[in-house]
Amino acid sequence: MAAKMIEEENRAGFHLFKIAGIQITLDYSWLIVFALVVWSLSAGYFPHYYPGQSNRAYWIAGFIAAFLFFLSILIHELSHSLVAIRSGIKIPEIILFIFGGISRLSEEAKDPKTELKIAFIGPLSSFALALIFRGMKMGLEGRQPSLSLVVLDYLIWINVAVGIFNLIPGFPLDGGRVLRALWWWKTGSLTRATHVASNIGKGFALTLMILGGFQIFMGALIGGLWFIFIGMFLRGIAESGYQELIIKQSLEGVQVQEVMIQEVISIPPELPLRHLINEYFLRYGYRGFPVVQEGKVLGIVSIADVKDILEGEDGNRTVEEVMIPISNRILIAPEASLAEALKKMVQEGVSRLLVVREDKMVGMITKTGLLRFLEIRHILET
């Protein structure tokens, strides 16, 4: 779990666009479920409820309905994110994946009231979308029946289903976050509240898997497998949510200067990239280095900054062209906690920070270093 939370991630997916500064990322697994939804609607659902149309009409309707369904999921997640942003919490990314979507919060809510608002808005947005599609259907009902009415029926039903499903009181569903907020409000302990909501979430996930097994036994293979996969996914997220909180709390009491790399290897800005790769990354095994000229720190360069550059360009480009210039987003004080360092790395999308005291670099802290610290601490405590 620690590795999942802290290590630099190479997420399988691609960036689509940004909304209100939030990066919308599409996981490759989303393409699988999108294709399955289009196929199930076009080959089964629409022909059953509105027979007599051409295959072309069914496939067009299936594509439009699937697209609007996933747009609804995006709006659901955006509603969470926009309320979180208004509450002072940064949301670097929304990821659409095989089971829907997830908003990546840079930190936990500061109080149960904020958590409650962020959690509740998701299901409310789904119900609001159902009402919007219902209004659109009512506007068309007086005319000749058409396939569009069936599409709107589906969108009404699926948004109501998403809203109700998310209200189930099991973490990490919205209902589980509502339960966590209320329990947090009652006890004053986020840790205890997360533990309770996480256990209920795991119980719900186990129930889904058992129901999936029964469905397979009764002959509904596809439906049963979906229940099992969703249950496994929710169980993993419920467990990881509690573990992430424990990890963050264990980082609170440790200062950056206790874990930072003190003897930092630096590189000059004019160094060709081929030399950077061969003489630094491959030689030392580090993923990043500060860029220094005449004792002055100019920035930082990581392997992620050069990995996509074509081999033929290596000899023509220098470190200065690809480095992240020095700024507050990559600096941290030695007295700051490791939790602050992790939060800053997540918010700024970087995997290492330069540790500075009175404008002088005294070390460097990395996500890998945080992971190593947690692993060693876990071994010593068990």
Image: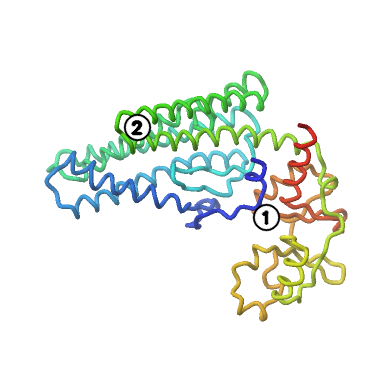
Q: Identify the residue at horizontal 75%, vertical 60% (top origin).
A: 286
Decide which of 224, 2 is in the foreground and name it: 224
- Contact, mark 2 vs mark 1 (Cβ under 8 Å): no
Quadrant housing the C terminus: top right
Q: Is residue 17 above or below residue 126?
A: below
Question: Could you give the CA–CA distance between mark 2 and mark 1, rounded to whole angstroms?
Answer: 45 Å
At mark 2, the secondary structure is helix
Q: Identify the residue at horizontal 36%, vertical 36% (top origin).
A: 159
Amino acid type at image mark 1: Val
Q: Nearer the viewer, mark 2 or mark 1?
A: 2
Amino acid type at image mark 2: Ile
Q: Is residue 270 above or below residue 260?
A: below
Residue 145 position, x and y percent, is 14, 42
Residue 129 relative to residue 239: left or right? left
Decide which of 98, 80 is in the foreground and name it: 98
Q: Mark on residue 350?
A: 1
Decide which of 254, 140 is in the foreground and name it: 254
Q: Which residue is mark 2?
A: 216
Q: Identify the residue at horizontal 62%, vertical 41% (top origin).
A: 89
